[in-house]
């Protein structure tokens, strides 16, 4: 019997996550580092709501088993029509928490421990955002932000311009790229000045992380971008609302230009052929 239990338990023990095998202080540090890198853009711990809820006392609002399951795949919980997941989505104005790579049950539990104050003295630091000025935005601030958005003013750490992936209602022409979402109403959707400044300082999405993890935006760049987004939200509509007629207008103008060029080219050719035929000079010069 003892041998049987050894055969059963042995493989399970060998297959446990390395996350559990490290000492408790190191495990807590790993949870803190993960929180700083992936969670501070949307959550605080006692600092108020950002895009997502304040995580202070989160384990009192829902049981751990549910929270661990949700953290591993938020979209799946929403798709399952779970009532509490639907409530979280509504409170986040439709912004879905991304499925974070490496989110195992062990890591999820360590993060929940961290929110409960079991993660050490770094908890408050992890919840803090960048030092962004609180002064009112000016027209010059918005103009500087649009220059950064368009890439006319290069980012200090060499990151790509926003326009390569995102659109904005105040950008002329077709408004920008389509790889990422339209940012015209982003300031309202992503938690206002505080929430969006934290998001920009530490983007949680895989694409943004790959681009900016080593090319972080500077506080003055974040402030200027916030000003541009604030101006866009107040003075324009999302690009999608006006894109159809812009495409139609450009297509119509392009069609007229093409017809005019064809008319110009064939008009001269027709006259040249007719002149030769009228004078009897085709082929023989007679």
Image: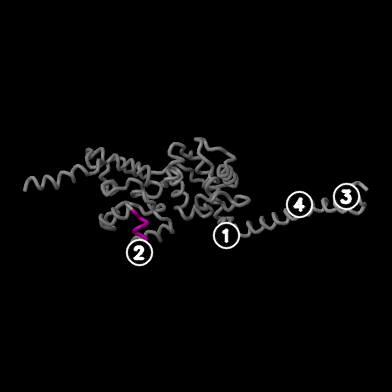
Q: Residue at x 46, y 37 (%)?
A: 215
Q: Position of residue 66 (x, y in %)?
A: 28, 57
Question: Position of 99 compared to 223: left or right?
Answer: left
Relative vertical location of residue 188 with respect to residue 107 in this rendering, above or below: below
* Boundaries of the magenta span: 73-79
Mark identifier at residue 81: 2
Residue denoted by label 4: 261
The answer to the question of whether label 1 and label 4 lie on touching residues, with beta carbons closer than 8 A, is: no
Secondary element under disc 4, as helix, strand or loop, is helix
- Depicted 209 relative to depicted 254: above or below: above
Q: Position of residue 263 (x, y in %)?
A: 78, 54
Looking at marks 4 and 2 on the same chain, the residue that comes earlier in the sequence is marked by: 2
Mark 4 vs mark 2: in front: 4
Task: Determine which quarter of the picture holds residue 146.
Answer: top right
Mark 3 neighbour class, 10 Å CA radius: few under 14, some 14 to 19, many 20 or more: few
> Which residue is disc 1 drawn over?
241
Q: Earlier in the sequence, mark 1 or mark 3?
A: 1
Residue 21 as seen in the image, left or right of residue 223: left
Please name the residue shown 58% across and 44% down the image: 150
Report the residue that reaches farthest toward the front.
Answer: 284
* Image mark for residue 140: none
SS label for mark 2: loop
Per the rendering, the mark at residue 282 is 3
């Amino acid at each position: 019997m003892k041998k049987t239990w050894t055969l059963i338990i042995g493989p399970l023990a060998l297959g446990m996550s390395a996350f559990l095998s490290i000492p408790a202080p190191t495990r807590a540090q790993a949870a803190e580092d993960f929180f700083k890198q992936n969670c501070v853009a949307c959550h605080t711990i006692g600092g108020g709501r950002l895009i997502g809820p304040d995580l202070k006392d989160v384990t009192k609002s829902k049981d751990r088993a549910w929270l661990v399951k949700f953290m591993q795949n938020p979209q799946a919980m929403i798709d399952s029509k779970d009532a509490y997941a639907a409530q979280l989505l509504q409170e986040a104005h439709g912004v879905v928490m991304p499925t974070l790579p490496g989110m195992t049950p062990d890591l999820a539990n360590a993060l929940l421990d961290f929110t409960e104050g079991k993660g050490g003295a770094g908890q408050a630091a992890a919840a803090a955002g960048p030092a962004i000025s609180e002064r009112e935005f000016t027209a010059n601030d918005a103009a500087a932000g649009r220059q950064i958005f368009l890439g006319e003013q290069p980012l200090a750490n060499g990151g790509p311009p926003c326009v390569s992936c995102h659109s904005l209602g105040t950008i002329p022409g077709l408004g920008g790229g389509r790889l990422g979402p339209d940012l015209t109403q982003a300031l309202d959707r992503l938690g206002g000045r505080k929430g969006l400044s934290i998001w920009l300082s530490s983007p949680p999405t895989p694409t943004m992380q790959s681009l900016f993890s080593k090319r972080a935006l500077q506080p003055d760049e974040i402030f200027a971008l916030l000003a541009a987004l604030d101006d866009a939200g107040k003075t324009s509509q999302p690009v999608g609302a006006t894109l159809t007629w812009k495409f139609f207008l450009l297509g119509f103008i392009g069609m007229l230009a093409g017809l005019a060029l064809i008319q110009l080219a064939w008009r001269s050719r027709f006259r040249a052929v007719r002149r030769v035929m009228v004078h009897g000079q085709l082929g023989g010069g007679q």
